[in-house]
Image (tube, rainbow, N blue to C red):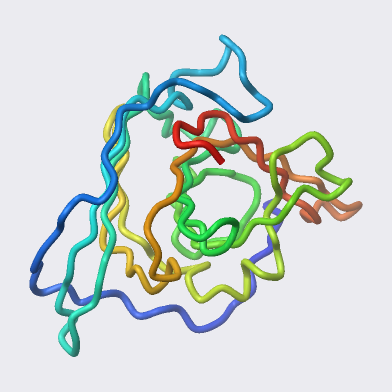
Amino acid sequence: MKSSIFASGSLGATLLAALFLAAPAFMSAEATGNNNGSNNSSGTPGYLKIGSTWTGVGRWFDGKAVVSIMESKLKVKEDIPTDGRHGAFGYAWLTSGFDNVLVVVTHLGIDDSSHEDHESGFHAHVLDLKAATPACAGYDAEVDLPGSMANAGFDKDYDFEIHGSKLKVKNVPTSDLGDTGVEAIAAFTVKPVLDSGGNPTNLCVDVVENPYGL
C-alpha cells in the first residue's frame, strides 16, 4: 500500500502553448564537482553527480496572453535509473531560497502526485522546503508539507523528459517559481519519516550534488 500526503483539489490548467517567442539562456555552467551536502563521498552514484546544466527563459502564448516560461537541461555522469528500484531521489531548481522549489523526483511508495509515472515513479512538483527539524537531524533540509500542499504548483503536470543521463524540464511558468532566476540546481535524496500508520510525517532531504552552492 502506498502512503499518501496528497490532498485532492483543482489542478492548474495545462499551458496551451502556441508560440515560442524568445529563450535567452540565463544560466549555463559546467559543474565543478564540489558537493556541499552531507552525502559527500566517492560512493555517490553517477546519476546524482551533475556534469553540466543549461537554463533559459522564454515566452509562450497560451491562447489568452503571453506568459514567461522556464526551460532547463542537466546532464549527470551516468544514466538516470527509471526502473523505480533505486530509492527516493531527484533533482531540484531553487529559485527563491527554500520557497517555490521545482523538483523532478521519484519516491515510489509515497503517493503525492496525480501525474506520477507508474513504472519509474518520476513526477514534478513546485514545493517549499524548510530547515531540518529534529526529526530530520543531520539532513540539509526537509519538505514543508503543509506549505507545499498549499502551493499552487504542487500537483501540476509539468513537462519533463529523461533520456539516459539527460533530464529536460520545460514549459514551467516562471510565475510558479516566484518570477525569480534559478539560484541553484542540485541532486538530492529523500528519506521519509513515517508514523505508526505508515504515513509520512517528515520528508528529509540530503543534498548530494550542488554545483552552485546552497
Q: Is residue 197 above or below residue 16?
A: above
The quarter of the picture where the C terminus appears is: top right
Residues 137 and 168: in front is 137
Q: Is residue 4 above or below residue 73?
A: below
Residues 176 and 180: in front is 180
Residue 43: x %, y % from top left: 58, 11
In the image, taking residue 49 as reference, residue 7 lies left or right, namely right
Kindly give the residue lying farthest to the bottom in the view shown: 64
Residue 74: x %, y % from top left: 32, 37
Q: Quadrant of residue 86?
A: top right
Q: In which quarter of the image is residue 192?
A: top right
Kindly give the residue lying farthest to the top in the view shown: 42
Residue 122: x %, y % from top left: 45, 46
Kindly give the residue lying farthest to the right in the view shown: 196
Q: Residue at x 57, y 29 (%)?
A: 208
Q: In this view, does 188 lie above or below 21?
A: above
Q: Residue at x 77, y 54 (%)?
A: 200
In the image, taking residue 33 as reference, residue 37 lies left or right, namely right
Q: Residue at x 69, y 63 (%)?
A: 5
